């Protein structure tokens, strides 16, 4: 059989999709391959098909048991002999698979990465005719990626031990940095590189500030998707159940799915969803990875994901059949605080620092009014024109925009005049003529730009700063210092005009008293009051302030604004004992 006959016979497809044939050919020529193609692009076929045209066995490394299992089942259903080896199997089963491998009865063998550090297994591989290795979800190799896995790092041993065996690496999401890391870590030799466009033209992407718990926004959204299949992502197990319950009460048929449910229930929900018996699943992000359901018509995020990579993967599960699909992201400043806390609890590694930067990028994306598709492409170092009609920002009417060119130039000039040595807050302080000691000490009250920024509130200036960051007019250096890019220099010269969605300034204004922007996600006024109280208590008792409450606790208090004991116990660092000691006085302030 030739390529096309194999495509038709085993996979039932009449033609290759973009990039597939090139990769198949490279593999048949025994070249290394590095393929970056969005979810649903058809990566699996790129290694499964050439395997069928080769004599030996192809070894596929994949991070998730469930994914491997689904693949093996699907392959077998297409009459392709495949198996997986995992720690879940008993000795008898693995011996059986070993026999079949030796007898040439298996074409594709799926394994978890840790298996490749097992001496017995490696020894066996050396005795088998291996065509090539496949590294699925290859971004897990990289600390720059969003799902670094220690045992993926060890895959470098493949080229050491099997110097002449080609490797084909696949991922849906990789920035240039991640791409280089994959190539270097796996020791790929001048791999054939394929980078598909990230633009999913059948996806309409929207993002909105969440109003309260977002449920009324969700119901509004679902009105346009009656009877359609979709996934709703929430952050916690508890909230999947709460939202599913809420929808059921509203007459919308939905099931919850999370890792804590009994296995039979999970399997049933999954199977019912795939077979269209259940239309909507409310899930944590554990759900949907590698799901082979092509008619998912919508994906909703009730809270902000921690990275754009995650977001892109998750929305990518919609519309794999190429038909129109819609995605909605609901987010609030609280999500950001929450995500930051998760990251703060991580051990100190380079990964942690990346995690903060990735979160910042996610927040900028959510707040931006540039083309969403363009923003995603730019994040992955790809360029494209604005989509025009496939995102909320491109379809927003012109009348909703204001010209902020003058303000942008003021802000950029102030950065220049303060020698690009300060963070955004400081620069804004100078613009607004702050009497802060630091400003006075630096003599910045003598600058011509000092105090010329009265027209906007501090929060509005922060928004303008965000906008400049989104446009790439500024970049953040070490210690959060803002620096101009070439584009920023052009803005000062008046080469570009800059628009902002009106709503962003007014929302900020209306909420200014309450707080909100991601540089400053807690209520600063409340925070200052709480800090005063803390200082008072500390000096009365003769103890350091942080023994009373940590800064993190104060920040969390000024985000959650608890009004009673029950809510207060939800705050970071406050247990019964702390509440007994200080709860009451802090509540008095909060209630005032
Ligand atoms: P990825 O791994 O890139 O996310 P998959 O390999 O799971 O994508 O493929 C996504 C879907 O596209 C699958 O349902 C698959 O059957 C289908 N597909 C892959 N290649 C082709 C093709 N050449 N023609 C039609 N459909 C294809």
Image (tube, rainbow, N blue to C red):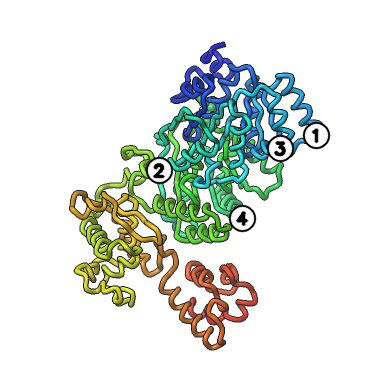
Which residue is denoted by mark 1 in the rendering?
A: 91
- Residue contact between numbered discs 4 and 3, judged by CB atoms under 8 Å: no
User: Disc 3 to disc 1, how far (Cα)?
Assistant: 15 Å
Q: Which mark is residue 118?
A: 3
- For the residue labelled by badge 4, is the local secondary structure a helix, a strand or a loop? helix
Query: Quarter of the image containing the N terminus?
Result: top right
Q: Answer yes or no: is residue 227 visible.
A: no
Q: Is residue 59 left or right of residue 440?
A: right
Q: Is residue 139 above or below residue 219?
A: above
Q: Nearer the viewer, residue 548 or 244?
A: 548
Which residue is denoted by mark 4 in the rendering?
A: 238
Which percent across, then down, holds residue 148? 56, 46
Which of pointers 4 and 3 lies earlier in the amino acid sequence?
3
User: Disc 3 to disc 2, how far (Cα)?
Assistant: 39 Å
Q: Nearer the viewer, residue 352 or 470?
A: 352
- The residue furthest bottom is 540
Q: Residues within 10 Å of mark 4 (few under 14, many from 20)?
A: few
Label 2 vs label 1, nearer the camera: 1
Whether label 4 lies within 8 Å of ligand 1 gets the answer no
Q: Nearer the viewer, residue 163 or 181?
A: 163
- The residue furthest top is 1
Which of pointers 2 and 4 lies earlier in the amino acid sequence?
4
Label 2 vs label 4, nearer the camera: 2
Q: Which mark is residue 376?
A: 2
Q: Residue drawn 51% across and 57% down? A: 339
Which of pointers 3 and 1 lies earlier in the amino acid sequence?
1
Which of pointers 2 and 1 lies earlier in the amino acid sequence?
1
Among the 4 quarters of the image, the one containing residue 102: top right
């Amino acid at each position: 059989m030739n390529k096309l006959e194999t495509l038709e016979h085993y996979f039932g497809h009449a033609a290759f999709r973009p990039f597939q044939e090139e990769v198949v050919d490279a593999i048949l020529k025994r070249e290394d391959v590095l393929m970056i193609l969005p979810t649903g692009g058809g990566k699996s076929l790129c290694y499964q098909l050439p395997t069928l045209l080769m004599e030996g066995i192809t070894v596929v490394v994949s991070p998730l048991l469930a994914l491997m299992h689904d693949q093996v089942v699907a392959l077998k259903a297409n009459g392709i002999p495949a198996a997986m080896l995992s720690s879940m199997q008993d000795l008898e089963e693995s011996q059986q698979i070993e026999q079949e491998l030796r007898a040439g009865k298996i074409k594709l063998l799926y394994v978890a990465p840790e298996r490749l550090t097992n001496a017995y297994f490696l020894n066996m591989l050396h005795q088998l005719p291996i065509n090539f290795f496949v590294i699925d979800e290859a971004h897990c190799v990289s600390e720059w990626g969003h799902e670094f896995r220690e045992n993926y790092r060890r895959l470098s041993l493949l080229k050491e031990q099997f110097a002449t065996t080609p490797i084909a690496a696949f991922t849906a999401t990789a920035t240039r940095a991640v791409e280089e890391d994959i190539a270097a870590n796996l020791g790929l030799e001048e791999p054939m590189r394929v980078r598909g466009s990230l633009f999913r033209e059948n996806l309409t992407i929207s993002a909105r500030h969440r109003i309260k718990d977002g449920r009324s926004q969700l119901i509004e959204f679902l009105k346009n998707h009656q009877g359609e299949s979709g996934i709703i992502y929430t952050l916690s197990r508890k909230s999947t159940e709460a939202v599913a319950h809420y929808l059921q009460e509203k007459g919308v048929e939905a099931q919850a799915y999370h890792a804590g449910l009994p296995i039979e229930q999970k399997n049933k929900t999954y199977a019912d969803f795939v077979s269209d018996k259940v239309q909507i699943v409310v899930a944590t992000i554990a759900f949907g990875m590698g799901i082979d359901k092509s008619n998912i018509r919508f994906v909703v995020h009730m809270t902000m994901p921690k990275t754009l990579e995650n977001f892109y993967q998750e929305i990518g599960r919609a519309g794999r059949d190429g038909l129109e699909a819609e995605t909605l992201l609901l987010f609030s400043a609280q999500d950001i605080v929450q995500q930051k806390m998760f990251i703060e609890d991580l051990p100190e590694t380079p990964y942690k620092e990346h995690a903060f930067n990735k979160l910042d990028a996610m927040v900028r994306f959510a707040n931006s009014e540039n083309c969403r598709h363009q923003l995603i492409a730019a994040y992955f170092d790809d360029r494209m024109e604005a989509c025009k009609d496939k995102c909320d920002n491109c379809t927003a009417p012109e009348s909703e925009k204001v010209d902020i060119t003058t303000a942008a130039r003021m802000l950029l000039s102030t950065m220049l005049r303060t020698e690009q040595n300060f963070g955004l807050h400081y620069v804004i302080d100078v613009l607004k003529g702050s009497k802060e000691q630091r400003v006075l000490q630096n003599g910045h009250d003598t600058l011509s730009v000092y105090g010329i920024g009265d027209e906007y509130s501090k929060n509005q200036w922060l928004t303008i700063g965000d906008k400049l960051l989104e446009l790439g007019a500024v970049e953040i250096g070490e210690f959060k210092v803002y620096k101009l890019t070439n584009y920023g220099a052009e803005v000062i010269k008046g080469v570009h005009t800059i628009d902002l969605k009106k709503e962003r300034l007014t929302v900020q204004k209306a909420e200014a008293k309450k707080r909100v922007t991601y540089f400053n996600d807690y209520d600063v006024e409340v925070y200052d009051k709480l800090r005063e109280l803390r200082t008072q208590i500390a000096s009365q008792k003769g103890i350091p302030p942080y023994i009373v409450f940590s800064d993190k606790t104060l920040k969390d208090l000024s985000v959650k604004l608890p009004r009673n004991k029950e809510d207060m116990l939800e705050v970071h660092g406050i247990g019964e004992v702390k509440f007994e000691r200080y709860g009451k006085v802090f509540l008095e302030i909060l209630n005032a």
